[in-house]
Amino acid sequence: MKELNLPVHLLIEKYKKGDFLPSQLIESLIKKIKEKDKHINSFIKVFENQAIERAKILDKKIKNKEKTGSLFGVPVAIKDNILVKDAETTCASKILKGYIATYNATVVEKLLLEDAIIIGKTNMDEFGMGSSNEFSSSGPVHNPLKKGYVPGGSSGGSAAAIAAGFATCALGSDTGGSVRQPAAFCGVVGFKPTYGRVSRYGLVAFASSCDQIGPITINVMDSWTIFRIIAGFDEKDKTTFDVPAPEIPEEEIKFRIGFPEKLLEQGVEEEIKARLDEILREFVKSKNYELKNIEMRSFRYAIPVYHIITGAEASSNLARFDGIRYGLRLEGKYLEEVYKKTRGYGFGEEVLRRIIMGGFALRSGYYEEYYIKAQKARSMILEEFMDNFEKVDFIITPTSPFPAFKIGEKVEDPIKLYLSDIFTVSANLSGIPAISIPCGKTGEGLPIGMQIMAKPLDEGRLFKLSLQLEDFIKQRYGN
Ligand code: GLN
């Protein structure tokens, strides 16, 4: 079945025309996943029977001409840190082995209400900590576009599943770039909404002040569709905004785009820099927009600030995995031994590193030195963004300074790996929305991602520009 890789509206159109039924699509998808995911490892669990059963219920809706939802029969993959009722949620960690979710995350509930079909749970870096999907108790994910390369992380399974055509849309979580960076490495679209736009209820917390759930899709329009469905106030997450859903403005707007040229001088691969430069200059010319060179001085503090804050939050959030309440328990002679054994064995190396780092930053005596300082620097980053947003409507950077790298290349050197996130973490620290869209490929055939950031809650205009850019890039560079 060649219809497996259609965007949402075309897929639904085919169903409506009677070209095929949801159950037929799902059956072919499952077959494809069984054949090909052995080499990619994007899924931790495929919901074979449940997905087919649900598709058959949807078949009937078509036959009976019942009202259908806006994601009717659309196969969706869910990152394994987002709860799907009655399914195991492992966060790719040994410590959650056997933990079965007792309820649906709000985002999952919303997708189901629109008649989506959940096809399975995707692989990830353990608890969302990583940039290459090599830190997973379910094994590394392979980039479907290039053998032997990482798909990015931590939502590497979700991005790989979309790039491989195993699902139409996927959900990931983005604490410091985990939706955008893997989307960039796999040549698909990844979007992190404004903090508070989308409910985190049912998302296993990594760093609560930065975490947001976002869609990974084959194009910008699908990203918008999913975003509109999952966004909105939720009683169960008091950090969600009670504001009207955003709309893409119809009128012509003469956008002003900020490009922090100086920032790109350090550490960005030549090919990526040149590509972005060329596209932006030609794009603004064709539209008669304004391109402004801006400064983002605070970006150089972003990585250390991000790791102190998210480490501190993670050390507290992950304290709940104690061998008593969830998943794994290793027996001990007394309670403390249960904790020690379970946590020592259950958490992987990177998670332990973050817990130790975070605990250290919060220790009395060090707290002012690290945590408080990091919070002050965090405010500086936000202020610099807001100052810039007085002058420009958007800020554009590469999503990552380099494209996908070889499996094993950076895993031994955490600092090198942390640098993949140099352009993405600031959006999380500031709560602003940011999207990564594909921007052609390098000479080696590795996808390049462009990141576009906007003011808080300015998603409507962000998507307007992203659709225009996507169109321009496709015309010029193909897919
Ligand atoms: N790669 C970053 C980290 O390791 C971001 C992770 C994320 O966004 N979940 O912390």
Image (tube, rainbow, N blue to C red):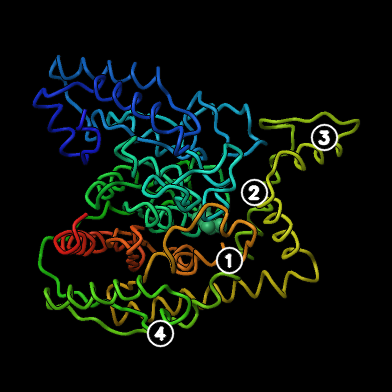
Say few, some or many: other residues with alpha carbon within 10 Å of mark 4 (under 14 / 14 to 19 / 20 or more): few
Kindly identify the residue that appears in the image at 69 percent across and 53 percent down: 315
Q: Which residue is mark 2?
A: 317
Q: Position of residue 334 (x, y in %)?
A: 90, 33
Q: Amino acid at mark 3?
A: Val
* Label 2 or label 4, whichever comes before in sequence order: 4
Q: Amino acid at mark 1?
A: Lys
**Marks 4 and 3, Cα distance to the nearest angstrom?**
52 Å
**Marks 2 and 4, Cα distance to the nearest angstrom?**
37 Å
Q: Regarding mark 3 in the picture, which secondary structure is present there?
A: helix
Q: Amino acid at mark 4?
A: Lys
Give 446 or 315, whichever is nearer the viewer: 446
Q: Regarding mark 2 in the picture, which secondary structure is present there?
A: helix
Q: Which residue is mark 4?
A: 262
Q: Position of residue 61 (x, y in %)?
A: 20, 18
User: Residue 388 sits in which quadrant?
Assistant: bottom left
Numbered disc in front, either 1 or 4:
1
Q: Which residue is mark 3?
A: 338
Give 291 or 266, whichever is nearer the viewer: 266
Kindly identify the residue that appears in the image at 43 percent across and 51 percent down: 240
Question: In the image, is 206 to the left or to the right of 108?
Answer: right
Kindly identify the residue that appears in the image at 70 percent across and 56 percent down: 353
* Label 1 or label 2, whichever comes before in sequence order: 2
4 and 3 marks in contact (CB < 8 Å): no
Q: Is mark 2 within 8 Å of ligand 1?
A: no
**Marks 3 and 2, Cα distance to the nearest angstrom?**
19 Å
Numbered disc in front, either 3 or 1:
1
* Label 4 or label 3, whichever comes before in sequence order: 4
Q: Which residue is mark 1?
A: 416
The quarter in which the C terminus is drawn is: bottom left
